[in-house]
Amino acid sequence: MVNKDTVIQVIGTISDSIIENSEMLNDLDRAIGDADHGINMKRGFEKVKTTLDTTAFTDITHAFKTVGMTLLTTVGGASGPLYATAFLKFADQCKDVEEIDVKTYAEMLSAAIEGMKKRGKSDAGCKTMLDVWIPYLDTFKKETEDGAEMSKVLELSMDAARGGFEYSKTIIATKGRASYLGERSLGHGDPGAASTVLILQSLSEMFQEG
Ligand code: ADP
Ligand code: MG
């Protein structure tokens, strides 16, 4: 049952996972950017954690909206407004929702992706975080429509997400700082794609029983 308490718990899990992996995210950004993706994300999610400890959230929308606004004001970099957009779109889709079901989750992801595409003026194939968000949602939708069990749906969706990160190694960046490198961005995974894998991993855990 994905209610407000589960969502708050998952936001904490996302925060811990980003904070723990910030060096890895810096390393990826060092290769094709300015080595600060982990620093940026850690700053944002440390603030999110403080906010979790000090806020009594009224509902799911309030929780996601707070994350979005916190990321917007603390992360900085290209990734800040993009992740802020994702969480603010999650918030929009959860208005009047007591529990997140499969349908709402797909709508949240879809709205987030549309928002980030607009905000970043980008799409799949530009070597960005979208190369992970999009295959995750596509697989999630396909597998739920095919009637797969939830654990299987999430496993396959995460396979697609990780596949998106691997794919990002094989293409030239056309958006963001890495695009300045042209062909030299080949062979390196996108840092934002890596942080999205972490976020989606924790979000997927929302649906785990118990
Ligand atoms: P900056 O590039 O300003 O240093 P970060 O290092 O925090 O910011 O974030 C870089 C990540 O942001 C990239 O790895 C990429 O995934 C994402 N990104 C950058 N520009 C765009 C864009 N236009 N659309 C989607 N994602 C983008
Ligand atoms: Mg950077």
Image: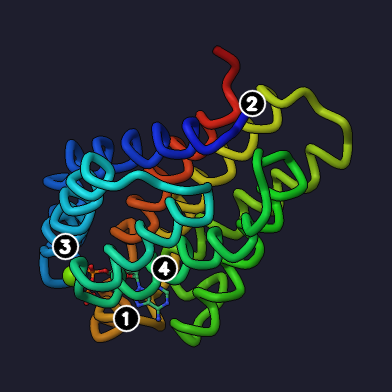
Q: Residue 163, percent across and down? A: 52, 46
Which comes sooner in the sequence, label 4 or label 3?
3
User: Helix or strand or loop: what does disc 2 sit on?
Assistant: loop
Q: Are marks 1 and 2 in contact (CB under 8 Å)?
A: no
Q: How is the image coloured?
A: rainbow
Q: Nearer the viewer, mark 2 or mark 3?
A: 2
Question: What residue sits right under mark 2 in the picture?
Answer: 1
| Left-right relation of 197 to 15 | right
Question: What residue sits right under mark 1 in the picture?
Answer: 176
Pointer 1 local density, CA inside 10 Å: few below 14, some 14–19, many at least 20: some
Please give the label number shown on residue 40.
Answer: 3
Q: CA distance from mark 1 to mark 4?
A: 8 Å
Mark 4 CB in 8 Å range of ligand 1?
Answer: yes
Which comes sooner in the sequence, label 1 or label 3?
3
Mark 1 CB in 8 Å range of ligand 1?
Answer: yes
Residue, x 62% and y 39% (percent of image)? 157
Amino acid type for the residue under numbered disc 3: Asn
Which comes sooner in the sequence, label 1 or label 2?
2
Q: CA distance from mark 4 to mark 2?
A: 32 Å
Q: Are marks 1 and 4 in contact (CB under 8 Å)?
A: yes
Pointer 3 local density, CA inside 10 Å: few below 14, some 14–19, many at least 20: many
Amino acid type for the residue under numbered disc 1: Gly
Q: Nearer the viewer, mark 4 or mark 3?
A: 3
